[in-house]
Amino acid sequence: MYRARLERDFKHWIDKGLLQEDAARAMLAEYDGRESTFRAGRVLLMLAALLLSASILLLVAANWEELPRLARVAGIVALIWGFHFAAAWLIQNGRTTFAAAALVLGAAAFGGGIALIGQMYHLSGDAADAALLWFVGACLSALAFRSAAMATAAGGLAWFYFGTMLTENGFSTASDWHLWSVPVLAVIVVLLVRFTEAGRARHLAYLLVLSWLGWLYLDSPSLAFAVGLAVLGLAAFLAATLPGSPVRQLALEAGSAPAFYSFALALLGFTGLQYEAVGVTTEVATGTGTLLVALLGIALAGAQNGAVRYLGYIAFAGELLYLAFETLGSMLGTSGFFLISGLVVACIAWLVIRIEGHMARTRQAEVSQ
Amino acid sequence: MNSGASTRRWLNPLLAALLVAGVQTAALGYMIESRASILRSGRDVLLKTVPVDPRDLLRGDYVILSYDISRLQPELFKGGLPTQSGEVMLYVRLAKQPDGFWTATEASFQPLPVTGDSVVLRSLPFSYYPSPSPLPLTVDYGIERFYVPEGEGRTLEEARNAEALSVNIRVDGKGRAQIREIAVNGSPVYEEPLY
């Protein structure tokens, strides 16, 4: 993990005389003192909470036939109240990790309650509606307790809602209302993440929007939509990374996410364009466009942004292989498959080594200035 | 991730617990009561079930119910059909037949008035796509699922596929329906209490 790598690097720098030993010790102490650092105990506790949540849900699925219905409802309501008040008590005693686990269990009990009631009373309503209700309950908990763990859970439930909508309602028969609610959920998750300082959980929301756009395209593929995605992504990416752009500084302060997700959106659009392209000439033209976008991404943001760099490499390699098989593959047969793969991978390796070397030299030059 | 500094709190934790547990309980209560109110005040309607295709797809612990009123023939439609695709609901007028079962006599995309002894049932929302020639429509009413204890689903599915299953529903003034009783060959096997 990062802690072990940090310690190893510090040792290396101390040996080289780049860093004072007491400074390194102070930095490590500061890192260990942070609330957000990885602790095995904390992670295990969350895992335990998730396992217990699963047991609640399974208990519901088993449907406790011996108990009368109202007793079962009373049981699940008691769990909801019990877990939330346990969380409140734990927060007041400063045991925030246990409190977070209790909140997750409380949310699981609420989800179990929705499933239990739907099952006992034969409510054959929409499964997506039930998932939405669960999401709203989790959001309320994240908001009221200002809980990062619950904001993360809400992010997961937004994904669960999206998944339920696709599987239960069929790929293309989801109602308009459900269709357009996905980005709204993502916005809510981002707001909750900011409010609760849940940090990395925001990626759940960004990825949800990206997948949703991808699904919208698959649902009704059209050239205009693919062009729209590509143009929108490219414009956002350029705004975030082009030197001289007014919002560049703002995007850089927000971390690597703005550049990465706009780049991913542009590539999604180009993947759509590739899908729309018919005939060798158009295919090669779109493919070249995709390759250029991948290189542009690496050139503009690859130096500071590892995520953009690797996505750029992957897109470049994928596109090159695709183009090679579309144009040459059919002529060469199975042995040609390996020939092309080998040549293409060798080209990419050469390119990556050049780019990485160039970037390392630039960084060294910046330091020595 | 979760720094417990009291400066971050904006709500007393006990109040937060009261709010969250209270609202979640109210939501569950609403789910139960909205069904119970239909059963309490609705009108009785007896429906015939039809076999479901594929016949032996055991759906976990619930039985899929399909009715003769689930598939509506084009000649039943009164009033205009939507000209654009979109989300719609269908209103279906049911009338009692001499054999005691109720069948659809009229269907419309606009609300139908309740007249005489008839009952108007409202479908769940669904996506409608206009077609050049009128086609039969298959709709759901929210009474297509019946959960049974593990292992008992088979018997009901066999009865359903032998067309020996009848379902008694109650329909409220807004056209919403809930299952009240399931009978095989006329004798009740599952009777649904209010709660």
Image (spheres, helix red, strand yellow):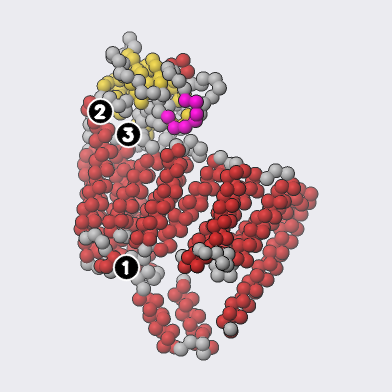
A172 vs A223, left or right, is left
Q: Identify residue type, mark 3.
A: His
Check the image and report above or below for B164 versus A42. Answer: above
CA gap, disc 2 to disc 1?
Answer: 49 Å
Residue B41: horizontal and vertical position, in percent?
23, 26
Q: Identify residue type, mark 1.
A: Ser
Check the image and report above or below for B166 versus A73. Answer: above
Residue occupied by mark 2: B39
Q: Identify residue type, mark 2.
A: Leu
Residue occupied by mark 1: B3
Q: Is residue B169 magenta?
A: no
Residue B56: horizontal and vertical position, in percent?
46, 30
| Chain containing mark 1 | B
Q: Nearer the viewer, residue A106 or A60?
A: A106
Nearer the viewer's eye, disc 2 or disc 1?
A: 1
Q: Please tell me if label 2 and label 1 are on a single chain.
A: yes
CA gap, disc 2 to disc 3?
Answer: 12 Å
Local crowd size for mark 1, using a 10 Å CA cut-off: few (<14), some (14–19), many (≥20): some
Identify the residue at horizontal 75%, vertical 58% (top origin): A339
Question: For residue A128, which quarter of the picture?
Answer: top left
Local crowd size for mark 2, using a 10 Å CA cut-off: few (<14), some (14–19), many (≥20): many
Q: Which residues are magenta?
A: B82-88
A103 vs A254, left or right, is left
In this view, which residue lies farthest toward the right? A331
In this view of the protein, can residue A171 be seen by the observer?
yes
Determine the secondary structure under disc 1: loop
Determine the secondary structure under disc 3: loop
Residue occupied by mark 3: A122
Question: For residue A343, which quarter of the picture?
Answer: bottom right
CA gap, disc 3 to disc 1?
Answer: 43 Å
Identify the residue at horizontal 58%, vertical 83% (top origin): A369
| Chain containing mark 3 | A
